Amino acid sequence: MNVNPDRCDPSRPDEAAMAKANDSYINVGKGATSFIGPDATRLYAAAQLQGFLKLFAKTGIVPTRGINGTRLLALATGYTGKGYKRGQHMQAYEDMCLWVDTMKAALPVLKDGQQV
């Protein structure tokens, strides 16, 4: 296995800031937005689930064949801590909106490496 020592040099200031595994932030760059760190990745997954819940509640369409309405509610329970019964997809969506908005407010946003 070839290891390039210049690739992950913690002495460089930009990489030293990203080296901490618990640091999470949203980086907005030219043409792309990156969710960096475990909390930011969880935020992205929650935002996707939020959209899936709304889609299912309004139309009955499932986002992929590997998931159903019950599984969507179980995933939402993992984020909100509230139990949902069959048919409560809009309630789960509203609770997920609150969770996602709270997490967005808590995470720092960087634009081209500078805090916004």
Image (cartoon, rainbow, N blue to C red):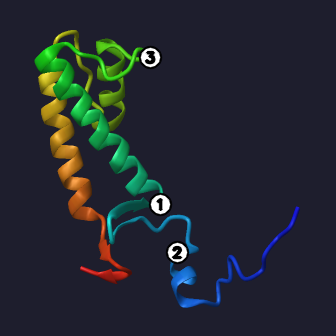
**Residue wearing tag 2:** 18
Q: Is residue 42 above or below residue 32?
A: above
Q: Residues within 10 Å of mark 1 (few under 14, many from 20)?
A: some
The local secondary structure at tag 1 comes to: loop
**Disc 3 to disc 1, how far (Cα)?**
26 Å
Q: Which mark is residue 37?
A: 1
Residue at x-position 54% and y-position 89%? 13
Residue at x-position 22% and y-position 9%? 86
Q: Position of residue 58 (x, y in %)?
A: 11, 19
- Do residues under tags 2 and 3 come within 8 Å of each other at their CB atoms? no
N-terminal of the pair, mark 2 or mark 3, is: 2
Question: Which residue type carries mark 2?
Answer: Met
Q: Position of residue 83 (x, y in %)?
A: 27, 22
Residue at x-position 12% and y-position 34%? 94
Q: Is residue 26 above or below residue 67?
A: below
Residue that lies at the very extreme toward the right in this rendered image: 1
Q: Residues within 10 Å of mark 2 (few under 14, many from 20)?
A: some
Q: Position of residue 24 (x, y in %)?
A: 42, 64
Question: Which residue type carries mark 1?
Answer: Gly
Question: Which residue type carries mark 3?
Answer: Gly
The local secondary structure at tag 2 comes to: helix
**Residue wearing tag 3:** 66
Q: Is residue 4 left or right of residue 86?
A: right
Q: Is residue 7 above or below residue 85?
A: below
N-terminal of the pair, mark 2 or mark 1, is: 2
N-terminal of the pair, mark 3 or mark 1, is: 1
Comparing 45 with 7, the one in front is: 7
The local secondary structure at tag 3 comes to: loop
